[in-house]
Image: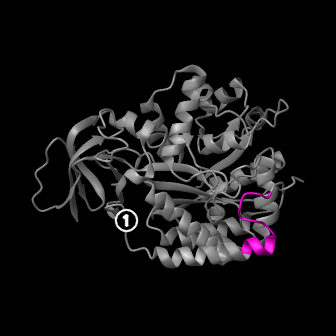
Amino acid sequence: MRILVTGGAVVSMDPAVGDLDRGDVLLDDGVIVEVAERIDAPDAEVIDATDRIVLPGFVDTHRHTWQSAFRGVGADWTFAQYLAAVHGTLKPQYRPEDVYLGNLLGRLEALHCGVTTMLDWFHCGQSPAHADAAVAALRDAPGRSIFCYGAGFRTTDPIDAEVRRVRSALPGGGLVTMALGLRGPEMTTMDTVAQDLELAAELGLRTSVHIESGGAGGRPIAELLQHGLLSDTTTFVHANGIDDDQLRMLAQAGSSVSISPDVELRMGIGWPETGRMLAAGLRPSLSTDDAPSAGGDMFATMRTAYTVQRGLDGGLNARDVLEFATVDGARACGLAARTGSVTPGKDADLVLLRTDDLTVFPANNPAGTIVTAGHPGLVDTVLVAGRVVKRDGRLLDVDLPTLRMRLVASRNRIAAAAGVPLDGTWQPRPA
């Protein structure tokens, strides 16, 4: 099918294509084939983008989607309280059906907000059935998703058999692919880190790992480098407090980074390291992290990253931040050849944002408007690989009333079994 997206302000995020005040984008069989001021395609289905900004879909490089049922419950939690509540109290009550519902609603929420590509950092794998439920939910949501199988916390348990089993069901090539979530040097032994990386390399999997300084002069990146374990296929999440020289080690290795500014600030993890990463030669990607303490839209994430760094040194511009949320995110996921910009030859992962909404009208500077004033209510149309999954502000082919009812029932059962109130008054005690 040929589709012509016509008459919008195109923010391509590709220097070779540039931005167009008024432009057309032609799609053929799910792929972008032409971007120009005017395209004549009388045989194509037309999507009218008048009063719309056309841009690549957002890329979220780190989201714990299974927690979506407990949105807002942890707004006032510290990171230690979050660990005690979610991993120590709620997670043991999760059944595979609960994982499925959380992942499905969370992935649909991300699509609703214009996130066409999302890495689902999954660490609720109490059983193979839990992992299978998470994958099934991602497949039932029409987005480009990466199932990042988290190997667990503070263990040296072997994971080969289960990772191979999941990998066999996700061979690659489709919209749902696989990565491996490492336990990392702060969670396990260096020998275990090496074994996990060897397994990932054998299976052709990119990896992601949570990392920070530990607040006591820890040097985990230097330790990884010393053991020859830094790679251009690993994304380091957060990296708060990491020394400048260690950030340069990541840049020299070609590694990528993912910051979650809202969660990092609210939970006391540390200041987002945006400026220091840029100074070290790294291009950060952005992530929303977890639903109990933060929203799931990239607009808020971009704005926090932008505002905080501008307040610290004034050195960041809006175009940088939009790149973090698109091309840099695609690169961190190993998908730079397929998505992240409106480029001929790439898959048609596109978002159309309303510019006639009074909150952004007149949108004189599209990139600046998106970063400083954008919000999910502007997301009019979303395409993934050329398929329209949201039109006129509504997700297509989704029974949201039934899904909402099932998710609330799941949430209520888990909360009751765990003895957790939902009104934000519970202050869990860290172990």
Residue 15's quadrant in the figure? top left
x and y percentages locating residue 43 in the rendered image: 12, 62
Category of crowding for the residue at label 1, using alpha-carbon neighbours closer than 10 angstroms: few (below 14), some (14–19), many (at least 20): some
| Secondary structure character of the magenta stretch overall | loop
Q: Is residue 156 above or below residue 220?
A: below
From which residue to which does the magenta span run? Answer: 414-426
Visible in this render: residue 201? Answer: yes
Identify the coloring: one colour
418 is within the stretch colored magenta: yes
- Residue indicated by mark 1: 394
In the image: residue 52, left or right of residue 111: left
In the image: residue 368, left or right of residue 194: left
x and y percentages locating residue 295 in the rendered image: 57, 52
Q: Is residue 94 above or below residue 182?
A: below
x and y percentages locating residue 251 in the rendered image: 60, 30
Visible in this render: residue 284? Answer: no
Q: Amino acid at mark 1?
A: Arg
For this orientation, the residue located farthest to the right is: 431
Q: Quadrant of the C terminus?
A: bottom right
x 73%, y 31%: residue: 241
379 is within the stretch colored magenta: no
Residue 406's quadrant in the figure? bottom right
Q: Is residue 356 above or below residue 29?
A: above
